[in-house]
Image (tube, helix red, strand yellow):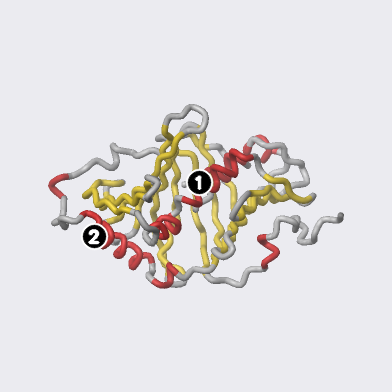
Amino acid sequence: MTAMVLAVLPGAAVSVWAQASAIPSAQPNVSADADVHGRQVLDQMVAALGGDAWRNRRNWKSTGNFGIFYKGAPNDVALKFEEMHQTEPFATRFVVITHMGSNIGELLGVPVGKDHRDIVELMTSKTSYEITYKGNHELPKDIVTEQLRQRDHSLDAVMGWLKQPGTGVFYEGTVSVARRLAERVSISTAANDTVTLEIDMDTHLPVSREFRYRDPVFKDFNVDREEYDNYQLRDGVMTPFTVTRYKNGDMVGQRFIADIRYNQTLDPKLFDPEVPLSGKPPKR
């Protein structure tokens, strides 16, 4: 389960410089104030994503398939998923639809009983749980830390940084990403936490998100990167139906959305860690 969630939750790699090399001849006329120009590019991006429809998403529900990679090589099995997310209070419910008996344990690297056909991970504002038919247990601290790091560097979170005092925006020119020209903009907080976005020059949609963080064990820097493709319009919001995540240059996960709907009526019990998969609270 650890590998699954860290690979596919979005809400997530090293800069692939060979795919994102600077192209000086393609540089547009840049304002002398890189902060102002960078913010203009970000405003265009938000408008392309849907403007108010994107800003005002309350929740969403998506379905699709995902794959897990190790050292860039995929596992043989692609799994189905169902994800439900709410913005206030923050919570994400990720359901792995396995129907694979005990083989899923070997695939995900965790012990899973034969009677567990569906596995749920529930991420709240402070921690994460694995939920089975027998109840729940909190995930290890290092896994929770990684998941919260992903959340805190998501596109939604980074757009929130712009409202914070001391946040700087830096326009870094044009790059080539997967044969598309993109504009690179970095956003840094007063604490020097930085996220870099690469934004398609034609569509103004984000094609990648990248950030670095210090490894808690080896003390060097890890680089986390997501790339976005196959945008489709749903409920007024442009959504990438293909999301690929990299860590230190290795592909670690890929998600293919089959459908997604925004601002749905979602049962609050879906985000209650005390409700097991049966839908009934466990007996005390």
Residue 167: percent from the left, percent from the top? 35, 54
| Contact check, label 2 and label 1, Cβ < 8 Å | no
Report the side of 5 relative to 183 (left or right): right
Name the kind of residue labelled 1 in the image: Arg
Q: Which quadrant would residue 282 be assigned to in this image?
A: bottom right
Residue under numbered circle 1? 149
Q: Nearer the viewer, mark 2 or mark 1?
A: 2
Residue 184: percent from the left, percent from the top? 27, 50
Q: Is residue 63 above or below residue 72?
A: below
Residue 111: percent from the left, percent from the top? 72, 37
Residue 198: percent from the left, percent from the top? 31, 51
Residue under numbered circle 2? 36
Name the kind of residue labelled 2 in the image: Val
- Which secondary structure, mark 2? helix
Q: Is residue 164 above or below residue 103?
A: below
Q: Pick the residue in front: 76 or 132.
A: 132
Q: In which quarter of the image is the C terminus?
A: bottom right
Q: Which quadrant would residue 248 be assigned to in this image?
A: top left
Residue lying at 29% horizontally and 38% vertically, measured from the top left: 17
Q: In this view, does 243 lie above or below 20?
A: below
Residue 237, label in figure = none
Q: In this view, does 146 lie above or below 126?
A: above
- Which secondary structure, mark 1? helix
Report the side of 154 relative to 44 (left or right): right
Residue lying at 30% horizontally and 55% vertically, measured from the top left: 199
**Residue that extends furthest to the top in the rendered view of this protein:** 218
Q: Quadrant of the N terminus?
A: top right
> Sequence order check: which comes first, mark 2 or mark 1?
2
Q: Pick the residue in front: 42 or 204.
A: 42
Residue lying at 29% horizontally and 56% vertically, measured from the top left: 200
Residue lying at 64% horizontally and 53% vertically, measured from the top left: 122
